[in-house]
Amino acid sequence: MVQHHTLVTFTAAATLGVFFLVLANRLKVSAIVVLLIGGILAGPDFLGLVNPEDLGGGLNVIISLAVGIILFEGGLTLDIKGYRQVSREIWGVLTTGVLVTWLSTTVFIKLVFGFAWDFCLFSASLIIVTGPTVIGPLLQRIRVKKNLHSILHWEGVLIDPIGVFVALLCYEYMASTGDSSQLILGDFLLRFAVGLSLGVVFGQLIYLILQRNWVEKEYFNITVLVCAITNFALADTIVAESGLLSVTVAGLMVGYRKPPGLASIVTYKVELKDFLIGLLFVLLAAKLELSKFTDYGVNLIWVLLAVMFIARPLNIFLSIRKSIITFREKLFLSWIAPRGIVAASMASIFALRLSEKGYEHAGFLETFVYSVIAGTVIFQGFTAKWVGHLLGVLVPKPTGWIIVGAHRLGRALAHFIADQGYSVVLLDTNAREVRQAVREGLSALCEDAMSIDPDQHSELYGTGHFLAITSNEDLNRLVCQRWHSMVRDATLYRWEKDGREKEVAKRLSVGENIWKEGRLEHWMAPDEDQIPLQRIQVEPEQSYPADNVLLAFSDNEIQPGPFWESTSPASLLILKETNTIQTSKLPIRREFVIFSERRDLESLYARMLELAAKTVPGIDKRKLLGNLLEREEEFTSLLGHGISMPHTYSAVIEEPILMVARPKRPIPCIHTGTKIELVFMLISPEDEPTEHLTNISQIARLISKETGRNALMAAENQAELFKAVIQG
């Protein structure tokens, strides 16, 4: 019967936790509010669906492990660069502000309740944190000025580990036992040393597992999870109460060193953390004894009001006193400081452990912290928009731009947008292009648009427009789909050559397909050529080269071309016609053009098929290689002039793939011994024979021209060879 009650309580808490998270997301309100109210209603004082007492000693284990995993995940996702790049205001909040909140709250608790100083310090340390889980949703609901958004965002992201570390140190000191201060200090230092050293050891172990691929990638997530749990259990076994510090240190180490595969692990841990937050908060809320809130009575309300209306304003006005932040903006920052799941979890687990050690006022921790959570999340959260409007710190719909692609074209568009007074950020995984953008005075991040978390980069705040212009059309569609679900009310644009979308892709695509007729891929490839751009001013009735318009600025709005409708004058960014660039219709990309050391056709073909497999991982390289070599033995692929064109079909690709290889030493033809100096390899979908023949015909025309052949053979590097192919 006991086992049945335990199962019912755990299952109900897990189910309700997930349900409340989904409900909060649907209602667009803070998850903490829904979890807190729902957990209390589900508890033994009301519906009786969740009775934490049924878990017995297992409750402590569940809370301890859940908090450990949450803290470990927090360490993994912490952006250490944030500590290095934060502005003076944020540094002030993270240093002076932390001390002001901690010490002033300590004084309030001491004056009102008269507890021992060490207990007051410990209680106050639990509300240092604000937390991204409550700040993030709040900032999404209200659009504040960028400087205020940046301060609140980075405070929420960076203050968690600071607050947790301070709370852990206070707890380790309180949990130490002994008859003298010397023994207490020694016990505290032992806990700290064990937690820190084991955290470093396990952090290094996890890093090596990921860095050296000691386990298969499909087992990365569960291996790291087991390492974190083992770290926690081992530290707590060696020295009680050292596990939380240890897993926090381990997570920080792994997150800082960023081993391969970390992105997928973080995604898994974030999902696991959300589940644990739901489970944990329902259990903790159900466990709350509401009578304790009335027992502490008016005194608790006085402390809560002091925290909200004295400690927080003191924090802001002292920590950023020398800032250019205006008085009204400081008032708004003083109003916003909601506490979240980390504070609640730490309070509950420490209350349990101190109760087991016989501390008389251990229950005060939960009562105090949950009062602060309820007061700040509910009161401040629901009044934030009204206060922001009253103080004049809200902004209208965001107008900033994100451009995926920091190549020549992306940078040119970014300059035009920035010159109109709008913020613009470039995203690219090519570090060279990003560095060039930064040298040109643009804001650019070397990040993958498919994995970057916009909440971790304050530069991306205020984004209202998203433009994907990589040379990979499939990638442009995918990033638009991802950002459509992440950025509220954003206008999405993408480039797709000739607008050639498969019917399925059309149905799944999001974002407006722009510049359909423009063959712009040449300007997306690294090169030194300057793009022939021109800025012109036109009147509404004035004629202009519509097909060449990239961007138009009119009526305080930027619109991608080629057409714009306005009754006002406009500034246009135009791609001028030129005869020096003739873009090719061949399915070629720069990364598919190589110079190779291979000395025989079989190894050269194998190398080229490896390039194709990077784009379409499902390609059967061995089968295609066999087909190509079999054809080569029957009929030579040599076209003449030292140029070969092997070609075949594949059932797993949707678009043709053309690769070009220039062996550094000519390779003899199998049949004639003629030297092969250049290889065009074409792979087409099995159901596209017409397009396959069309591409073969285009390659043949390119090779038949003496000027084209000379340019191909004269190319000395990848960029020159790619340019020669696309210029035809």
Image (cartoon, rainbow, N blue to C red):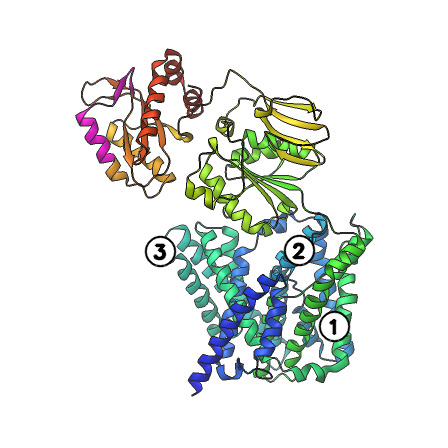
Q: Which residue is mark 3?
A: 215
Give amino acid for label 1.
Leu
Q: Is residue 639 magenta?
A: yes
- Label of residue 304 in the image: 1
In the picture of the structure, the residue carrying the numbered disc 2 is 139
Between label 1 and label 3, give the one nearer the viewer.
Answer: 1
Which quarter of the image is occupied by the C terminus?
top left
Q: Quadrant of residue 544?
A: top right
Residue at x 57% of width, y 72% of height: 281
Q: Position of residue 322 (x, y in %)?
A: 79, 50
The disc labelled 3 sits on which kind of residue?
A: Val
Residue 57 x %, y %: 49, 82
**Could you tell me if residue 251 is visible in this image?**
yes
Confirm or deny contact between disc 2 and disc 1 (CB under 8 A).
no
Secondary-structure class at tag 2: helix
Query: Is residue 483 depicted above or below 390 in this figure?
Result: above
Which residues, given as a range, are shown in magenta? 625-643
**Amino acid at dot 2:** Leu
Residue 633 picture location, percent across and down? 18, 27
Residue 67 visible (yes or no): no
| Quarter-of-image position of residue 442 | top right
- Quote the CA–CA distance across marks 2 and 3: 40 Å
Q: Residue at x 65, y 64 (%)?
A: 129
The residues bearing labels 2 and 1 have C-alpha atoms spaced at a distance of 23 Å
